[in-house]
Amino acid sequence: MHLVYGLCLKYFKEREASQDAVMHIFEKLVVSVKQHEINNFKSWLYVLAKNHCLMTLRSLKGKKNEMLDPEIMESALQLHPTEEEDLEDDLTILENCIGHLKNEQIRCVELFFLKKIPYSTIVEKTGFELKKVKSYIQNGKRNLKICMEKNSE
């Protein structure tokens, strides 16, 4: 854990952000370890932690952390749509976009993301090669992202 913390500290340069990142990485680790074949755990963990830090920094890029005075906001309920409405809209868009994927991508994406089935089991269930399964999942995920971005504008 201390090595992961050191890596996070290198990227975030803040103790609190690094501690939060370590917690997120280890939460992610519990799920990811079951889904991947790991030959060298230490190097795999390093890559997982590094990717997490980079993705977090990328998502924060361009966002300003600005404190807002509560009196400036008139009414959160009137000015902002509810999260439930946003979620419902996103789910509708996602359903439509899934229909645009190739059948192999749909099958692999549903098994991997919705049913949380590891690669090896997907290979057994579908009969696809491991490389094909990974490719279908990666391409399906990318295609869904592109489709959702187009339809949510």
Image (cartoon, rainbow, N blue to C red):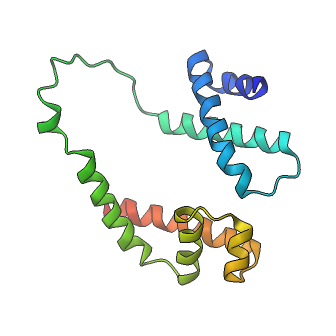
Quarter of the view holding residue 152: bottom left
Q: Nearer the viewer, residue 50 or 1?
A: 1
Which residue is situated farthest in the right direction here?
Answer: 39
Residue 58: percent from the left, percent from the top?
A: 54, 38
Identified at 52% across, 81% down, the residue is 102
Residue under the point 32% across and 18% down: 67
The quadrant the C terminus occupies is bottom left
Q: Is residue 112 left or right of residue 61?
A: right
Q: Is residue 134 above or below residue 11?
A: below
Q: Residue at x 53, y 70 (%)?
A: 110
* Percent coordinates x, y for residue 27 in the rendering: 62, 39
Q: How many marks?
A: 0
Instruction: Determine whether, in the image, residue 56 is placed left or right of residue 84.
Output: right
Q: Is residue 81 left or right of residue 152?
A: left
Q: Position of residue 50 (x, y in %)?
A: 70, 37
Q: Residue at x 26, y 50 (%)?
A: 84
Image quadrant occupied by the N terminus:
top right
Would you identify the image quadrant in which residue 87 lies?
Answer: bottom left
User: Would you say residue 132 is visible in this rendering?
Assistant: no
- In the rendered view, does 64 fall on the left or right side of 84? right
Could one spot residue 137 in this view of the protein? yes
